[in-house]
Amino acid sequence: MRLAVSGGAPLAPNLARCFIGLGLPLVQGYGLTEAAPVVAANRVEDKLPESVGAPLPGTEVRLGEKDELLVRSPSVMLGYWERPDATREAIDAEGWLHTGDQARIEAGHVRIVGRLKEVLILSTAEKIAPADLEMAIADDPLFEQAMVLGEAKPYLAALIVLSGEAWPGFARSLGVVPGQAGALAAPAVVDAALKRVEQRLERFPSYARVRRAWLTLEPWTIESGLITPTMKLKRTELAERYARQIAALYEQDRAAAGSGAEGRLGSGALGESAR
């Protein structure tokens, strides 16, 4: 194997470094169908695992409003078939394709930080791309999947799927019986899980901290309609499925505010009954 290329979903930098360290050049690229389809890619001789690499020859990139990645190239489509309105929305008068992805361009390399439609704006006006946080959280072997919440809220919360293999040992280390009803909601469990989340988010700004979490052992699958075939979260479907749990994560602080009490990190967070 001379080379492996990753695309379709974000590649965790530490995973890329692991393969590179083993002698297998694993490079990440980025593109979309409308650009036929590759826009940028790391090269074996010039790779930054945190990025999707430099633009291909003949491809121009720049940042537009709200740091949206714009692409201009002969490879960009002429338009959507018999959809002129959609074409005008996607490609502006100067020929720039609006990707819908938020990015940073550093040292000639492109770094994708999230989708425009997926950016969370807290009630404090701070803007957060949840995908980066979710990837960092899921890097912990205790956590299989995570969805970060916080749109128009004063702080971030998260729905987290725990690893079925790691859960029993984690629970017992806290003096909790893993198969007992309500084990996932035990304060010791929630607080310990949030501490591990906090460790994973140390490199992020201070406002990008998860203060509440709801834990479950039931994975989100393609069959359940909660993730796409490329393993991306279906945020709308997840929000609808877990509307009651999400509301409870924020209801706690409203109740605390009314009584003048301050909840500690993770205090009172909900968990699903252990299976």
Image (cartoon, rainbow, N blue to C red):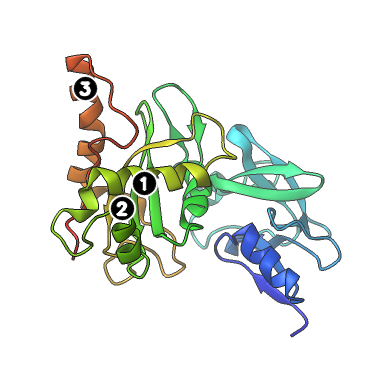
Whichever of labels 1 and 3 marks the residue nearer the N terminus, that label is 1
For the point 68% across and 39% down, the residue is: 63
For marks 2 and 1, give the one nearer the viewer. Answer: 2
Q: Position of residue 7 (x, y in %)?
A: 61, 67
Q: Position of residue 57 (x, y in %)?
A: 83, 60
Q: CA distance from mark 1 to mark 3?
A: 22 Å
Q: Is residue 262 left or right of residue 30?
A: left
For the point 40% across and 65% down, the residue is: 228
How packed mark 1 is, by other alpha carbons closer than 10 Å (few <14, some 14-19, many 20 or more), is: some
Q: Which mark is residue 174?
A: 2
Amino acid type at image mark 1: Ala
Q: CA distance from mark 3 to mark 2?
A: 27 Å
Q: Position of residue 214 (x, y in %)?
A: 28, 47
For marks 1 and 3, give the one nearer the viewer. Answer: 1
Whichever of labels 2 and 1 marks the residue nearer the N terminus, that label is 2
Residue extending farthest to the left is 181
The residue where tag 1 is placed is 192
Q: Secondary structure at mark 2?
A: loop
For the point 74% across and 70% down, the residue is: 21
Q: Is residue 72 left or right of residue 148?
A: right
Q: CA distance from mark 2 to mark 1?
A: 8 Å
Whichever of labels 3 and 2 marks the residue nearer the N terminus, that label is 2
Q: Is residue 153 left or right of residue 114?
A: left
Q: Secondary structure at mark 3?
A: helix
The residue where tag 3 is placed is 256
